[in-house]
């Protein structure tokens, strides 16, 4: 039998996990023929709710789900895992920016980074979802230095998917016709959804959508503020679409990127596009399935470069707020 993929999920009794775990167990991420072990991590007060989630997993009789472990002990939870999906943290409420969560959530990611470095498998890859996800990822990465820096990711894919849908709708084309959708910078209201380099049916978006005022205005702000719009409408932050983006992200990292496309993920900067080394920054990347590289050589307009500088500066500001958690 194939060796199971061991996946740790923090915040396993929360809203995102409630959409995610069943798809992980059903084979939506690693394939229908790959066994999966879930290692579900929660804080003690949520353990009873987690028991209920596990009962439901049992009741699905998923053929590929070979084992489920529940724990509030990080070393047990991350023991031998190939993937760690760090979701557990507090979501923002209406009127807050994600950065406002740094004081509440940042501290969660230091011990998690340490525990991953000491307990996970040698090939572990980590995706941080809990907000503000780029800076939380930076905290975890800096505290888990035994794991190479290129194995730590933060989630920009929900923004990518949101942007693709907006462009497809405007052009009256299917969403599958949109490629090369880069989201630069922070998963926040300063992110830059780069319509200049995106393509519809292989043609640059500004040549397909002639309403450039919409591209430069409503398109960008809709994507930047979509999370807040969902909180305002639903009374709770996005969950099913976030879980879907987790699945898309892991697949995009773990499988080769199709020719002529790229995917957006927060990764460690090596100084590309003037982003300071070490910042956890949303870039377009291409993956081989086991390694990845930032897409280089893209030329930005002055407006695009200025937007990238703004989101970079915001991330530098977040970094300076958490210096005590970085060592
Ligand atoms: N990056 C993105 O695109 C994106 C999208 C949506 C939501 N999010 C973020 O994901 C996070 C989770 O959202 P949710 O809707 O699932 O929230 P939720 O409140 O429904 O669930 C969070 C869960 O995390 C658990 N938790 C809290 N601290 C923990 C810890 N130290 N260890 C393990 N578990 C812990 C809680 O008990 C709870 O069950 C939030 O920070 C939210 O803002 C990010
Ligand atoms: O907006 C939020 O706080 C939740 C999430 O990051 C989102 O983008 O929907």
Image (cartoon, rainbow, N blue to C red):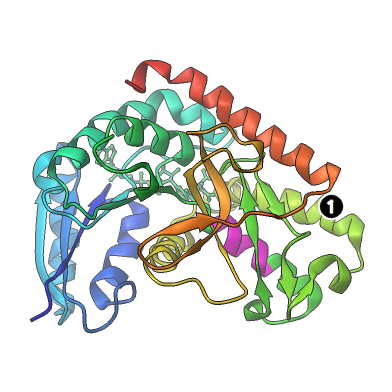
In which quadrant of the rendered image does the C terminus lie? top left
In which quadrant of the rendered image does the N terminus lie? bottom left
Answer above or below: position of 186 versus 100.
Answer: below
**Does 161 appear in magenta?**
yes
Q: Crowding near pointer 1: few (<14 within 10 Å), some, many (20+)?
A: some
Residue 72 in view in this figure: no
Choose between 86 and 267: the one closer to the eye: 267
* Residue 70 in the image, given as x and y percentages of width and height: 11, 52
Query: Overall secondary structure of the magenta stretch?
Result: helix
Left or right relative to 182: residue 288: left
**Does 107 appear in magenta?**
no
| Residue visible at 92% across and 68% down in the picture | 210
- Mark 1 lies on a secondary structure that is helix
* Residue 83 in the image, given as x and y percentages of width and height: 26, 56
User: Residue 169 sits in which quadrant?
Assistant: bottom right
Q: Over which residues does the magenta segment extend?
A: 158-165
Q: Which residue is denoted by mark 1 in the rendering?
A: 216
* Residue 282 in the image, given as x and y percentages of width and height: 56, 47
| Residue visible at 62% across and 74% down in the picture | 260
Choose between 275 and 235: the one closer to the eye: 275
Left or right relative to 10: residue 76: left
- In the current view of this chain or complex, which residue is farthest to the front? 297
């Amino acid at each position: 039998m194939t060796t199971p993929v061991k996946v740790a999920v923090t915040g396993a009794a929360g809203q995102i996990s409630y959409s995610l775990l069943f798809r992980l167990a059903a084979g939506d991420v690693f394939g229908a023929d790959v066994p999966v072990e879930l290692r579900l991590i929660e804080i003690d007060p949520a353990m009873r709710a987690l028991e209920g989630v596990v009962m439901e997993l049992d009741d699905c009789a998923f053929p590929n789900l070979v084992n489920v472990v529940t724990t509030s002990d990080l070393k047990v939870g991350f023991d031998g895992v190939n993937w760690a999906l760090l979701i557990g943290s507090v979501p923002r409420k209406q009127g807050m920016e994600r950065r406002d969560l740094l004081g509440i959530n940042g501290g969660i990611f230091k011990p998690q980074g340490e525990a991953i470095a000491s307990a996970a498998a040698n090939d572990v890859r980590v995706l941080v979802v809990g907000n503000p996800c780029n800076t939380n990822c930076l905290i975890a990465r800096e505290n888990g230095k035994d794991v190479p820096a290129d194995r730590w990711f933060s989630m920009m894919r929900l923004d990518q998917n949101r942007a693709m849908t907006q462009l497809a709708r405007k052009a009256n084309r299917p969403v599958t016709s949109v490629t090369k959708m880069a989201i630069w910078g922070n998963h926040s209201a300063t992110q830059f959804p780069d319509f200049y380099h995106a393509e519809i049916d292989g043609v640059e978006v500004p040549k397909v959508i002639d309403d450039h005022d919409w591209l430069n205005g409503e398109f960008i702000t809709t994507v930047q503020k979509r999370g807040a719009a969902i909180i305002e409408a639903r009374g709770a932050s996005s969950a099913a679409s976030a879980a879907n983006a987790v699945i898309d992200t892991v697949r995009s990292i773990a499988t080769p990127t199709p020719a002529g496309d790229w995917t957006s993920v927060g990764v460690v900067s090596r100084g590309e596009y003037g982003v300071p080394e070490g910042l956890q920054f949303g870039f377009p990347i291409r993956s081989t399935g086991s390694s990845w590289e930032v897409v280089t050589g893209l030329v930005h307009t002055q407006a695009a470069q200025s937007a990238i500088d703004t989101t970079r500066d915001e991330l530098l500001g977040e970094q300076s707020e958490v210096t005590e958690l970085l060592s």
